[in-house]
Amino acid sequence: MAVTIQNIDENSPAEALGLRAGDVLLSVDGEPLNDMLDYQFYTDSPHFSLVARVSGQEKTLAVAKDEYAPFGCNFATYLADKKHSCANHCMFCFIEQLPPGMRETMYFKDDDERLSFLFGNYITMTNMADHEIDRIIKMHISPMNISVHTTNPALRVRMLANRRGGETLGYLARLANAGIAVNCQLVLCRGVNDGEELRRTLSDLLALGPGIRSIAAVPSGLTRYRKGLYPLMPYDAASSAEVIDILEAYGNSQKEKTGSRIVFPSDEWYLNAGRPLPSAAFYEDYAQLENGVGMWRLFHDEFLDELARPHRVIGQKQIDLVTGTLAAPLITDMMAELHRQYPAVTPHVHPIQNDFFGGNVSVAGLVTGRDIVAQCKGKLQSGRLGIPEVMLRDEKDRFLDDMTPAEVGEALGVQVELLPCGGGEEARALLRTGLHLERRRTPRG
């Protein structure tokens, strides 16, 4: 294997050696270079022997540089390689439930251990081989985020529709025993891997010891585009409560034994069950925040903490806000508290039913532009529309249906204001008018 240089940093060790764009790096100290992880790991040393194809000729170059200083090569992609694609057809896979006609990139299923380490993506390990596990252990690539779903080998094969689903469970023990911190994800399907199967999975994972840093369970997301797929039922209030009871029981037990809960339900379970969210202390260090575990508690607390700080603004502000139906009650309460403390700021909350995806999809992050336009037409009470950035892709420029915030604003005849994801940041944005307003300090009734 090899990696091809796209460009070279000026005044870098690579430039001093005469390397140029188009040259190919083959190995360092006899270790082949396959991707960015190999490149960064093996070129970190102050002295190494590099084999490269320079201007078409293979050369061995002695490298001397400051320890930890970058070598200076850049590649066409951040991996210096193509993403590893998923080999599964999971019964709950959200991508296989997407409607036709979306951006091509939306249909790519990654299952790449490099992305797990670099960006927190979850992987099933079914497309990995022993030597790739060896590399993770050798480089101590930690933490790793693993989609486990079940520790029942036969059931995992069935859920992932991959014959390697069972055998690759053995990699969990290898990683944990080698000191690699593992965050586990369980996507639960009603009547499939919950109940007694969930208890088995939790017991098996916790038996692997302290290498299992956290375990989070999330409900499967079901859209209306499941034709021909395994028939799954959405969780209701009662079945969500049953899952919470199991997860909290195991978490409470671990808390008593080890001082850490380890096992966490995602926020959706509490919202579905109509139960109050746990306190911030429950989530400890928010180990799986990006998996929706404690996200609402953190947002809520940061929002109220920001309101408690002094803000002086003069003038009036009205703004309409959109959110998903799942979080709408929480958002409505928070906006009411903002208005109570700062009466000159009047937010109007509009829960958006997800007609685009349908099914049980109700989270804010999957709301589309066309649903906002269809459901807000003629209902807005101000000339400003607040749209949470979580509804947009990373570049903050497009919804999942490819509409832009500007197009939504034009369709509704309003100015769009993008609202940050953090609770404190959103509170500050809502209070920002360009003028100053003083907080009402009367006790809450």
Image (spheres, rainbow, N blue to C red):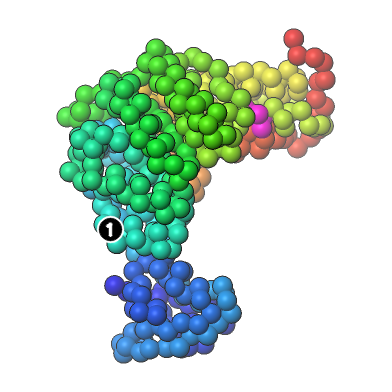
Q: Nearer the viewer, residue 317 or 84?
A: 84
- The quarter holding residue 42 reads bottom left
The residue located at (59%, 79%) in the rendering is 66
The residue located at (56%, 72%) in the rendering is 68
- The quarter holding residue 442 reads top right
Q: In the picture provided, is 101 more to the left or to the right than 414?
A: left
Please tell me whether residue 84 belongs to the stretch shown in magenta.
no
Residue holding disc 1: 130
Query: Quarter of the image containing the C terminus?
Result: top right
Q: Position of residue 335 (x, y in %)?
A: 64, 22
Q: Nearer the viewer, residue 182 or 38?
A: 182
Q: Is residue 436 visible?
A: yes
Q: Is residue 110 above or below residue 262?
A: below
The residue located at (49%, 14%) in the rendering is 274
Q: Which residues are magenta?
A: 299-303
Q: In the picture provided, is 41 more to the left or to the right than 153?
A: right
Q: In the picture provided, is 99 more to the left or to the right than 271?
A: left
- The quarter holding residue 32 reads bottom left
Q: Nearer the viewer, residue 444 or 172?
A: 172
Q: Is residue 98 above or below residue 5?
A: above
Q: Of the residues shown, which amino acid type is indicated by label 1?
A: Asp
Task: Specify few, some or many for label 1: CA neighbours under 10 Å numbering under 14, 14-19, or 20 or more.
Answer: few
The residue located at (41%, 63%) in the rendering is 138
Secondary structure mostly seen in magenta is: helix
Please tell me whether residue 300 belongs to the stretch shown in magenta.
yes
Query: Quarter of the image containing the N terminus?
Result: bottom left
Where disc 1 sits, the SS reads helix
